Image (cartoon, rainbow, N blue to C red):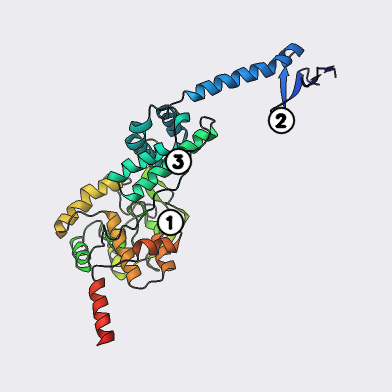
Amino acid sequence: MARVELKRGEGTLRERPDGRWELRRVIDGRQRSFYGASRSEALAAPTRAAESARRDAEAAADVTVAAYVARWTVNRRSAVRASTIRHNASSLSKWVLPAIGSRKLRTLTVDDVRAIQAAAAVHCQPGTVRTLNLVMRALFRDAVEDGLMTSNPAAIRAPRVTPRDLSTPPLSVDEVKRLREAARGDRFEALLCLVLTVGMRPGELLALKRRDVNMVDRTVSIHGTVTDAADGGLTIGETKSRAGLRKVPMTAACASAFERQLDGLKSDALIFPADNGGLLAPTNFLYRYFYPLLVRAGLPRVTMRDLRHTALTYMVADKVDPVTVAKIAGHSNPSMTLNVYSHATPQGSEHALESMERRFS
């Protein structure tokens, strides 16, 4: 194996057993190896590598936020849910691209991120602003890993999220009764019963199959949720978190509603399908069935999230232990359950006055 002595500082050159030539040279304190089919090619390799790095750096310096967002959205399709990609793209197109889409990535600063947060905070809830910050953080983190930025300007404290309790109070007991009465005999009576009593998420309910319901134990097993598919359709995907994989109890009223709903269904049949027998999109359920039901009940337009909010609020108010409530709700952390749902119910003040009157009379 031939070896060539070079001048001091130029490294060493040797012929490898495979016939190629290898140049070893210390660059920026690190030893690197360069290869070539001949001596001259190996000796010229460091110059070629430096030129290529210079061109890459120049190209990276010209990458705009809009160009990188387009690339980033495509690259994430195999890593996250289709619904997550859609929501991320919506947040970026609404708040980020209009503000900094034409800017070069390398010119962005923390002040740019804070300006976007401030603009969004004027029109959005704190939770939405926090989610936007997390999307920007992920976007610019990947840009740093790709060598297009030196630091992540969104790696800052996300806006604090305050509970929704005062702005969206739970339904009153009378309103819950009116809604349940309006749903009596409806094809979605069992679904609404579960939302109002144990706070199940709509997507989880619409993904239920006959085999997920145990009428002997009066339990419902949650294995997935309806979500967007990559091809634009619907599929049953993973739950929001691992805590979402759970078994929830049914009340006697819910069990009665399910007995009627399950009659004649096969094990793998959807319990709450669309008219064509396939998966029912949550938005279609809202507009075609739920909102008309609210009208029949004489109630203002609320969301399915508000029904979940109502159920969990009353559980906490009724002194159900936080661990049990969190398990039923599919929360991974009981403290989160308490932070969001341990607040005054519409009847809370009246009950507190009655309690104080009894105590001090």
Q: Nearer the viewer, mark 1 or mark 2?
A: 2
Please tell me whether mark 1 or mark 3 is closer to you in this view: 3
Residue 259 figure quarter: bottom left
For the question of whether residue 263 can be seen, the reply is no
Instruction: Give the residue type at disc 2.
Output: Gly
Quarter residue 193 falls in: bottom left
Cα distance, mark 1 to mark 2? 50 Å
**CA–CA distance in space, label 1 to label 3:** 29 Å
Residue ID at (46%, 45%):
156
Total number of numbered discs in the rendering? 3
Quadrant of residue 322 within the rendered picture = bottom left
- The 10 Å Cα crowd at callout 3, few under 14, some 14 to 19, many 20 or more, is many
Could you say where residue 154 lies in the image, as x and y percent from the top left? 45, 41
Q: Is residue 90 above or below residue 18?
A: below
Tell me the residue that label 1 is attached to: 244
The earlier-in-sequence mark between 1 and 3 is 3
Which of marks 3 and 2 precedes in the sequence?
Answer: 2
Q: Position of residue 262 (x, y in %)?
A: 31, 59
Query: Tags 2 and 3 in contact by the CB under 8 Å rule?
Result: no
Tell me the residue that label 2 is attached to.
Answer: 29
Seen from the viewer's position, the closer of residues 248 and 325 is 325
Q: Name the residue under label 3.
A: 154
Discs 1, 3 touching: Cβ within 8 Å: no
- Specify the amino acid type for callout 3: Ala
- Quadrant assignment for the N terminus: top right
In the image: residue 197, left or right of residue 324:
left
Q: Which residue is drawn at 71% across and 21% down?
A: 34
Q: What element carries label 1?
A: helix
